[in-house]
């Protein structure tokens, strides 16, 4: 607990930039590696020099604490119930990389009041200097996932080559296009670059014919690799444990590409604090 407090104090004392980019990671169906990718992307962004928060918003299946190998005694639900302060639940994974644990039940959206909002926003100031907040949303197109997609700056839709997963990914893209005019795609478990490109081209053609308002961009792919299966099953961060592996290098390509693309999109003027972001989320319920 002493190290956690010290790390948070360092974060609190950093210069505040308030230009955090909120990136929602989602998928049409479960079991395609969304949480594994979210955790590894967050870690890789940190490795290449960014300050990163990862928010476990997979309501009903919050498990990033297990993946990072940390223990979360309290989570966001305790904050909303006024049983803890935000600073008490944030878990430093590394200095500059922080887990914001969600809750595995929908009760999280039942607790809201103007007093809670103001306290939450005040407490969340220690997160104001983050460059990225990666949001691991739930799979599918449920109400909770939609709210995170709407309020994030950008969305990455992840799929695998399975036909059912591709169909569900397209449904997610169609829904997200209501809120976003640009959506990134990541193809996981691709046998080759050619297969990833074919899947993306197929989805892009359908989208161009049926969704006029959205631009799809392939942000990258992760090759089919037993290493990903191993770390998905055993809960671990492969970019940390296997830095020279193909999945780690591919994740770095995605991280650098994402950072580059978002650097070009800095003209939107809005309140970029985590507290304001979460107030918008809770305001929908």
Image (spheres, helix red, strand yellow):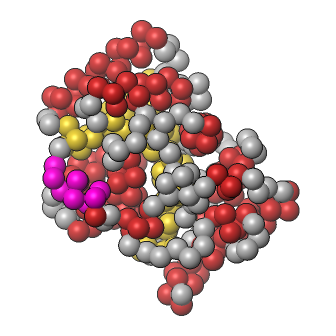
Note whether 211 is above or below 193 in the view shown: above
Q: Is residue 200 left or right of residue 153?
A: left
Residue 116 occupies quadrant? bottom right
What residue lies at 23% left-to-right and 68% top-to-bottom?
A: 241
Q: Nearer the viewer, residue 109 or 12?
A: 109
Q: Main secondary structure of the magenta part?
A: helix
Quarter occupied by residue 124:
bottom right
Q: Residue at x 25, y 32 (%)?
A: 161
Q: Which residues are magenta?
A: 225-233
**Which percent across, then down, holds residue 140?**
48, 36
Q: Residue furthest bottom?
A: 2
The quadrant of the rendering that contains the N terminus is bottom right
* Number of numbered discs on residues: 0
Q: Is residue 151 left or right of residue 69?
A: right
Q: Choose between 266 and 43: the one closer to the eye.
A: 43
Name the residue rendered at 68%, 69% in the picture: 78
Towards the viewer: 191 or 11:
191
Q: Is residue 182 magenta?
A: no
Asked if residue 202 can be seen in this view, the reply is yes
């Amino acid at each position: 607990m002493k190290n956690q407090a010290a790390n948070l104090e360092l974060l609190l004392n950093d210069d505040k930039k308030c230009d955090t980019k909120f990136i929602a990671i989602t998928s049409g169906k479960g079991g395609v590696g969304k949480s594994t990718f979210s955790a590894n992307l967050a870690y890789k962004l940190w490795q290449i020099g960014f300050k990163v928060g990862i928010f476990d918003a997979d309501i009903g299946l919050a498990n990033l604490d297990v993946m990072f190998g940390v223990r979360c005694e309290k989570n966001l639900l305790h904050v909303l119930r006024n049983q803890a302060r935000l600073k008490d639940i944030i878990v430093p994974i590394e200095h500059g990389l922080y887990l914001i644990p969600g809750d595995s039940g929908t009760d999280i959206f039942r607790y809201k009041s103007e007093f809670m909002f103001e306290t939450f926003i005040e407490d969340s100031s220690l997160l104001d200097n983050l460059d990225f907040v990666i949001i691991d949303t739930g799979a599918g197109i449920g109400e909770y996932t939609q709210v995170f997609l709407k309020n994030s700056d950008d969305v990455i839709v992840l799929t695998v080559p399975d036909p059912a997963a591709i169909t569900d990914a397209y449904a997610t893209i169609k829904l997200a296009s209501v809120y976003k005019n640009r959506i990134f795609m990541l193809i996981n478990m691709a046998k080759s670059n050619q297969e990833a490109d074919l899947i993306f081209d197929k989805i892009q053609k359908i989208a161009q014919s049926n969704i006029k308002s959205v631009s799809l961009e392939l942000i990258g792919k992760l090759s089919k690799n037993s290493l990903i299966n191993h770390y998905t099953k055993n809960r671990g961060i492969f970019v940390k444990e296997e830095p020279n592996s193909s999945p780690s290098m591919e994740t770095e390509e995605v991280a650098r590409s994402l950072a580059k693309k978002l650097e070009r999109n800095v003209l939107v003027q809005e309140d970029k604090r985590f507290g304001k972001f979460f107030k918008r989320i809770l305001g929908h319920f």
